[in-house]
Image (cartoon, helix red, strand yellow):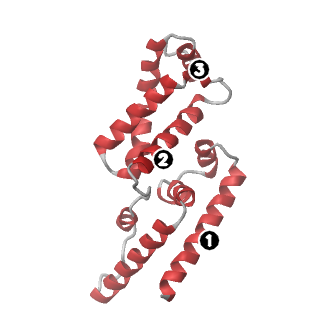
């Protein structure tokens, strides 16, 4: 069974061999868990969302055409599961800017510099939260997760060039929003 490609396994699931879904789960549950956990930092929620992805794979298996990589189809479903969860819970999907803070080292630890840095981070968090979810997502994928534009394009179902434009526009919108907050 390990010699079968993901597409071949999914085609078997689509055709009614539901026991093959376990193979796909084994291959992708860790990757999906990381995908969700990087956004919500909640282990239980991430596990639940992974389960929901495979429930949807089962539910919509008849729609699988086998064109392109299975992984892209799976992550399209994962994005929808995440979006639906946050919409249902009326939670604005935003990775915490506090996570970014942990990645930025402050070379000057003086109290004044620390206070300025904290204010800037708060302002950046506010600006990021005011962005449209799509712009926020593309920034998270490119800047926080460090994915290449090609990988982001595969996840979002668009070309690498389109991702470059999306990242550029998202950064421009973030800069404008940040500046507006600064001027207040």
Q: Secondary structure at mark 1?
A: helix
Considering only order in the chain, which callout, 1 or 2, is on the residue closer to the N terminus? 2
Which residue: 34% across, 78% down?
Answer: 118
Q: Nearer the viewer, residue 30 or 135?
A: 135
Q: Secondary structure at mark 3?
A: helix
Q: Looking at the image, is mark 1 or mark 3 nearer the viewer? A: 3
Q: Position of residue 7 (x, y in %)?
A: 59, 22
Marks 3 and 2 sit apart, C-alpha to C-alpha, by 22 Å
Residue shown at 62%/61% (left/top)? 167
Contact, mark 3 vs mark 2 (Cβ under 8 Å): no
Q: Secondary structure at mark 2?
A: helix
Residue 14: quadrant of the picture = top right
Mark 3 packing: few (<14 Cα in 10 Å), some, or many (20+)? few
Residue 96 on image: x %, y %: 38, 62
* Residue 78 left/right relative to 157: left
Q: Is residue 2 above or below residue 174?
A: above
The residue at which mark 3 appears reads as 62
Number of the label disc, if any, that sits on residue 83: 2
Q: Which residue is mark 1?
A: 172
Specify the label residue 52 is tagged with.
none
């Amino acid at each position: 069974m390990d010699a079968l490609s993901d597409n071949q396994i999914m085609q078997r699931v689509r055709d009614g061999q539901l026991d093959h879904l376990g193979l796909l789960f084994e291959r992708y549950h860790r990757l999906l868990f990381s995908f969700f956990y990087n956004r919500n930092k909640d282990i239980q929620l991430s596990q639940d969302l992974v389960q929901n992805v495979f429930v949807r794979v089962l539910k919509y298996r008849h729609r699988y055409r086998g064109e392109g990589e299975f992984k892209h189809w799976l992550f399209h479903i994962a994005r929808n599961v995440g979006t639906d969860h946050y919409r249902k819970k009326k939670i604005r999907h935003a990775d915490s800017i506090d996570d970014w803070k942990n990645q930025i080292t402050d070379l000057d630890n003086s109290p004044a510099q620390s206070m300025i840095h904290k204010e800037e981070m708060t302002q950046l968090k506010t600006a990021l939260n005011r962005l449209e979810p799509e712009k926020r997502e593309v920034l998270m994928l490119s800047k926080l997760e460090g994915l290449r534009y090609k990988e982001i394009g595969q996840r979002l179902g668009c070309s690498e060039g389109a991702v470059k434009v999306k990242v550029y526009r998202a950064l421009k919108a973030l800069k404008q929003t940040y500046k507006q907050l600064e001027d207040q």
